[in-house]
Image (tube, helix red, strand yellow):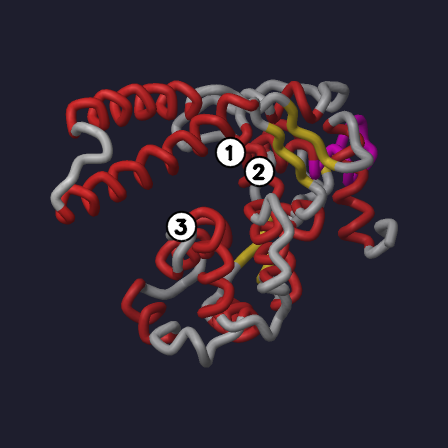
């Protein structure tokens, strides 16, 4: 039954293996900023290779514990951490397909927007828009008040994490088209951080060999400066957030409805 603007509920439906696989695919490609031919993502990719692919680029950024927390937070995975570790204790023998099946068996759910009744008419796009706005809202906070005519970039730049999370919750397939661009300072800070850590380890190695490559005082000063730059860059908003082919929140709502009807462009 269509809801009204004042009493709109956030309803959920059981997620399918296809939903969870699409979410994994979108999340994986959003992290693999550079092509990695050594690892091809697919349903038969082992968890061991999947974890290695992340570690090759970011280090232990999204390990198997992070995978559990992500499924639990985004899709309400109904199992405790011990059951999860029992499931993934042999990552070379488990695949992405196995994870999707395990998630479905443990009652993962995905947002299922309810059509909204406006002036006596039922509108699916309005229901999706309102569900998206509510899904972005943090607990104990007032709902966001953006409008359908607002651009995706203007809404998402100030709240990239909340926007991305809402998109993954409502339509994982569409999340693969999400593109978030950051300033050059973010990339520079990350590079300098890795160079600083590498320099510190090299200095430690040289110290064990009996000679000094760089004094520890100078290294600590450099480490402190880079840490401050990295901290500052972490607070900078993205320079641009976009979804390929879409401009406004109304465009996004219509596209989600098309996906739900199975009529999205190939």
Tell me the distance, in whole angstroms, between the alpha carbons under discs 2 and 1: 5 Å
> Residue 239 appears in which quarter of the rendering?
top right
Locate residue 105, reporting x and y percent.
49, 73
Mark 3 near mark 2, Cβ–Cβ under 8 Å? Answer: no
Residue beneath the point at 55% across and 23% down:
184
Residue beneath the point at 27% across and 27% down:
223
Mark 2 near mark 1, Cβ–Cβ under 8 Å? Answer: yes
Taking the image as shown, residue 221 lies to the left or right of residue 8, namely left
Q: Please tell me which of labels 3 and 1 falls first in the chain.
A: 3
Q: Please tell me which of labels 3 and 2 falls first in the chain.
A: 3
Taking the image as shown, residue 94 lies to the left or right of residue 179, namely left
**In the depicted structure, whether residue 231 falls above or below residue 175:** above
Q: Secondary structure at mark 3?
A: loop
Please say whether residue 12 is visible from this viewpoint: no
Tell me the distance, in whole angstroms, between the alpha carbons under discs 3 and 1: 21 Å
The residue segment tinted magenta is 117-128
> Residue 22 appears in which quarter of the rendering?
bottom right
150 or 228: nearer the viewer? 228
| Numbered tag placed on residue 161 in the rendering | 1
Q: Secondary structure at mark 2?
A: helix
| Residue that numbered label 3 is attached to | 59
Query: Which dot, 3 or 2, sits closer to the camera?
Result: 3
Query: Which dot, 3 or 1, sits closer to the camera?
Result: 3
| Numbered tag placed on residue 164 in the rendering | 2
Taking the image as shown, residue 106 lies to the left or right of residue 132, namely left
Q: Residues within 10 Å of mark 3 (few under 14, many from 20)?
A: few
């Amino acid at each position: 039954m269509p809801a009204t603007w004042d009493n709109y509920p956030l309803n959920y439906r059981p997620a399918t293996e296809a939903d969870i696989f699409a979410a994994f695919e979108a999340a994986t490609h959003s992290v693999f900023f550079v092509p990695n031919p050594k690892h091809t993502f697919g349903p038969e990719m082992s968890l061991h290779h999947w974890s290695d692919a992340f570690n090759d680029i970011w280090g232990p950024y999204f390990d198997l514990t992070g995978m559990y927390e992500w499924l639990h937070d985004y899709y309400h995975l109904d199992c405790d951490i011990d059951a999860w570790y029992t499931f993934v204790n042999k990552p070379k023998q488990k695949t992405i397909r196995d994870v999707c099946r395990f998630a479905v068996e443990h009652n993962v759910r995905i947002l299922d927007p309810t059509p909204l009744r406006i002036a006596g008419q039922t509108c699916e796009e309005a229901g999706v828009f309102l569900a998206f706005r509510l899904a972005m809202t943090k607990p104990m906070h007032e709902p966001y008040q953006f409008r359908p005519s607002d651009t995706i970039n203007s809404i998402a730049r100030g709240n990239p994490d909340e926007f991305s999370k809402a998109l993954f919750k409502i339509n994982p397939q569409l999340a693969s088209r999400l593109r978030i661009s950051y300033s050059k300072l973010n990339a520079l800070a990350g590079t300098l951080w890795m160079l600083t850590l590498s320099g510190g380890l090299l200095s430690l190695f040289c110290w064990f060999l009996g000679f000094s490559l760089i004094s520890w005082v100078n290294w600590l000063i450099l480490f402190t400066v880079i840490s401050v730059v990295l901290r500052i860059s972490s607070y900078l908003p993205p320079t641009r957030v976009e979804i390929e082919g879409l401009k406004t929140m109304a465009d996004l709502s219509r596209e989600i409805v098309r996906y739900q009807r199975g009529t999205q462009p190939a």
